[in-house]
Amino acid sequence: MSDRTTEIEAAVFRRLLEHLDSRKDAQNIDLMNLAGFCRNCLSKWYVAAAEEHGETVDYEAARERVYGMPYSEWKAKYQLEASAEQLEKFEKGK
């Protein structure tokens, strides 16, 4: 992989985070039900990728990077209670 490819992939990741930040209405459970991943998954992947490259990134620090603020703050401001329908769809998708 070239340095240029890495730069492009990093730019795509930043754009994904910007997009998710602009769509706070897209709840994590909706993302999980539709795409099979959510912001928390991205945070876990961030931690795993760091480890693969010999770096240590704390999960909460990764969440802050993905959410653009501490997770507890994002959750208090933007996370809605999941509906029974959302939870049922989530359970069926496991």
Image (spheres, helix red, strand yellow):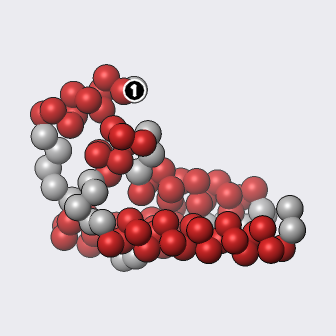
Q: Residue furthest top?
A: 92
> What amino acid type is highlighted by mark number 1?
Lys
10 horizontally vs 53: left or right: left
* Helix, strand or loop status at disc 1: loop
Q: Look at the image and tell me in which quarter the C terminus lies.
A: top left
Q: Quadrant of the N terminus?
A: bottom right
| Residue at left offset 86%, top offset 68% | 2
Q: Nearer the viewer, residue 29 or 6?
A: 6
Location of residue 26 by image quarter: bottom left
Is residue 60 something that shows in the picture? no
Write the residue at 72% across / 75% down.
7
> Would residue 48 be seen by someone viewing this image from the given angle?
yes
Crowd class of label 1 (few under 14; some 14 to 19; many from 20; radius 10 Å):
few
Of 82 and 34, nearer the camera is 34
Residue at image location 46% in from the left, 69% down from the top: 17
| Residue 3, placed above or below residue 91 | below
| Identity of the residue drawn at 59% across and 60% down | 46
Q: Quadrant of residue 80?
A: bottom left
List x then y, in percent, for residue 47.
60, 59
Q: Position of residue 36 (x, y in %)?
A: 44, 39
Q: Is 19 left, or right, of 3 in this rendering?
A: left
Left or right of residue 26, residue 60 in this image: right
Query: How many numbered badges does the structure rendering display?
Result: 1
Task: Read off the residue under disc 1.
Answer: 94
Q: x and y percent of residue 22 in the render? A: 32, 72
User: Whole-percent x and y of residue 82?
Assistant: 17, 44
Residue 50 placement: quadrant: bottom right
